[in-house]
């Protein structure tokens, strides 16, 4: 096994530059934003309605699968090293955090040590 541990970081582009990572998933333009729904705007990925909305978005589950396969590709490499995967959306409270949680849960099943960090989940909603 080449990947000793995987750091999965969710973040919001509106709160600052993306963290340094081997892989960065930018969810801003391709996947529906729960922020536009007033009932979800002030909720986060800790809330089931947000997670359901994000995971029901066409393409999201396939993206999570693809990201897990990319992690497997790094694992197949000849050098043992940690891997960082960053997942970003506009504010970091809905899409990025949900996808990061789902990806981390999937990767944990492989037995690899997973560290999940939500950089901007607790920050205030960005009004746009």
Image: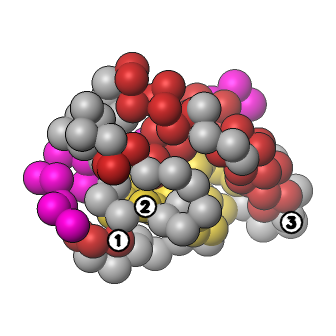
Q: Which segment is the magenta one?
A: 108-128
Mark positioned earlier in the residue sequence (1 or 3):
1
User: Would you place residue 98 above or below residue 26 in this image?
Assistant: above
Assign the magenta stretch its main secondary structure: loop
Name the mark on residue 78.
Answer: 3
- Please name the residue that numbered disc 1 is placed on: 13
Residue lying farthest top? 48
Q: Is residue 77 left or right of residue 55?
A: right
Q: Within the magenta stretch, is there residue 102?
A: no
Of 74 and 68, which appears nearest the observer? 68
Q: Within the magenta stretch, is there residue 109?
A: yes
| Residue at (50% x, 25% y) in the render | 52
What is the secondary structure assignment of the residue under circle 1?
Answer: helix
Distance from Cα at disc 2 to Cα at disc 3:
32 Å
For label 2, count other residues whose C-alpha is less than 10 Å away and answer few (under 14), some (14-19) or many (20+).
many
Q: Is residue 117 visible?
A: no
Residue lying farthest left? 124
Distance from Cα at disc 2 to Cα at disc 1:
6 Å
Q: Could you tell me residue 76's position as x and y percent? A: 88, 56
Q: Is residue 67 left or right of residue 32?
A: right
Q: Is residue 9 left or right of residue 64?
A: left
| Residue at (61% x, 40% y) in the render | 57
What is the secondary structure assignment of the residue under circle 3?
Answer: loop
For label 3, count other residues whose C-alpha is less than 10 Å away and answer few (under 14), some (14-19) or many (20+).
few
Q: Is residue 113 left or right of residue 64?
A: left
| Residue at (39% x, 44% y) in the render | 34
Q: Could you tell me residue 110's position as x and y percent? A: 74, 31
Quarter the C terminus occupies: bottom left
Name the mark on residue 89.
Answer: 2
What is the secondary structure assignment of the residue under circle 2?
Answer: strand
Q: Could you tell me residue 90's position as x and y percent? A: 36, 64
């Amino acid at each position: 096994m080449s990947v000793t541990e995987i750091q999965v970081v969710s973040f919001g582009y509106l709160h600052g530059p993306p963290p340094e990572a081997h892989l960065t998933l930018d969810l801003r333009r391709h996947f529906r934003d729960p922020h536009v729904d007033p009932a979800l705007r002030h909720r986060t990925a800790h809330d089931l309605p947000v997670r359901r909305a994000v995971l029901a978005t066409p393409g999201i589950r396939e993206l999570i699968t693809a990201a897990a396969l990319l992690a497997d590709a790094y694992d197949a490499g000849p050098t043992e090293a940690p891997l960082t995967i960053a997942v970003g959306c506009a504010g970091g409270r809905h899409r990025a955090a949900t996808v990061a949680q789902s990806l981390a849960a999937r990767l944990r099943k492989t037995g690899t040590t997973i560290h999940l960090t939500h950089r901007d989940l607790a920050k205030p909603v960005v009004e746009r």
